[in-house]
Amino acid sequence: MTIEQPAFGKRVREIRRAQGLSQGDLAGDDLSPSYVSLVENGRRIPGAKIARSIAERLGTTVEALSTTDQPADGLTQRLGLVGQLVAARASQLAGDWPAARRQLEAVVAQADGTDHDEVRWEARWELATVLGRLDDPARHEAALRELLDDPVTRSAPVLHARVAIELTHLLRAAGRLSEAVRSAEDAVRVTAELEAGRPERAQARMALLCASVDSGEWSRADELGAQLRAEVAPLPAGELRAGALWAAAGAQYLRGDAAGALELLAEADALIASTDGMRLRLRLVRARTLLALAAGPSAEADALLERSRQAAALVDTPSVRSWLALVETAGALRHDDPEAAAAHAAAIDPEAAELSPLDRARALLHVARAHRAGHRPAEAEESFKAAAAGYERAGAFRLALETWRELSAGARAAEGPDPHAVLMP
């Protein structure tokens, strides 16, 4: 292929800048930044080997970089963009998230200013997903908010809902619950235009229910739970249906129906058992265990506690170990064994990676209960206050209030549901 300058250099510069790379980053070990500068300025025509090296580092092809400034054939250009999008998806399947990011940023840069809106949208959506996998929450959020402003998003309720739901998940994980509720409400609003039976309708309502329970809007959650169960009824078995039943279980428990909530969680567990979502299954086992320890029959609670131990043995990470210590603490308190509770509570690390702000506060609450059971009032008070402060920072003001009440009362009220035992999907 003939490399036309200065068009080649111009496209190299555009894509490099779009990806936030310096000329030194692009040069790597086999080129010099000054040579890259000469290429970008059109003063050097690279050979085929160097051109391929530059293209690979930018996540694109020599053909795409060689496109001149003359009007291109629309179909040819679209096929080139789709080809690069397919390559980025292959990188995602291989788990090479940095490469996928570079490739998708290149597609976005090349698609901007063209009439290939659908390809550009898909590339931006997948780029947002990849940024989430790379644990870059600030850029992940920025990418999602840019998508919400995209004309394609605003014109398509399904796409609008998809972005709003993803943003809700991100905000919940970041402990920004009031914002999460508003984002989920946006998703519910746009999906109201869709026909019944669309999975996006159930996903939006599930997102709103989870955010409402976490933020303490429990009276609203009861109504949302009933709506969600109606939405999910016609959907096939799978993770979405399981997640919806799980979310509805949280609302049902908070209105005082512990037995019904445990039945819903058991049904969700059966639906999710055959899926590949290991992290989701782990969290569901914890949710069932905590609820059973708070309000279930002893035999069921003990059996689920043993399942939590077995599940934790499959994934050994700091957050999984902290979660196991938390449910072990709850189990020891259920059996009125303060020494065991203290030993397990000592293994809880509220700062473990992957714990959300809400879960950190929940961990501190269980540490506080273990201190109180062991007659260590000063340590208990300190942990209760830290838990309440954590809930408040996350916007979970109802949970913070319940924590202050438990501290001032000297014990948790025996009657009524324990809101700290509700773990949403």
Image: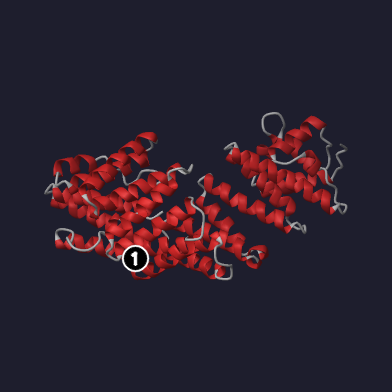
Task: Measuring from the top left, give residue 146's x and y in whole percent.
Answer: 61, 60
Residue 414 visible to the viewer: yes
Task: Measuring from the top left, give residue 259's x and y in whole percent.
Answer: 28, 58
Q: Is residue 305 above or below residue 365?
A: above
Q: Quadrant of residue 412?
A: bottom left
Q: Residue at x 36, y 53 (%)?
A: 265
- Neighbourhood count class around disc 1 (C-alpha, 10 Å): few under 14, some 14–19, many 20 upward: many
Image quarter hosting the N terminus: top right
Q: Quadrant of residue 32?
A: top right
The secondary element bearing badge 1 is classed as loop
Q: Residue at x 38, y 48 (%)?
A: 284
Left or right of 414? Residue 41 is right
Task: Measuring from the top left, give residue 392's x and y in whole percent.
Answer: 33, 62
Left or right of 50? Residue 269 is left
Q: Amino acid at mark 1?
A: Gly
Left or right of 326? Residue 153 is right
Q: Furthest residue to the left?
A: 375
Residue 22 visible to the viewer: no
For this rendering, which residue is in front, 88 or 223?
223
Residue that badge 1 annotates: 216
Task: Measuring from the top left, give residue 88's x and y in whole percent.
Answer: 66, 42
Circle count: 1
Q: Is residue 402 above or below residue 273?
A: below
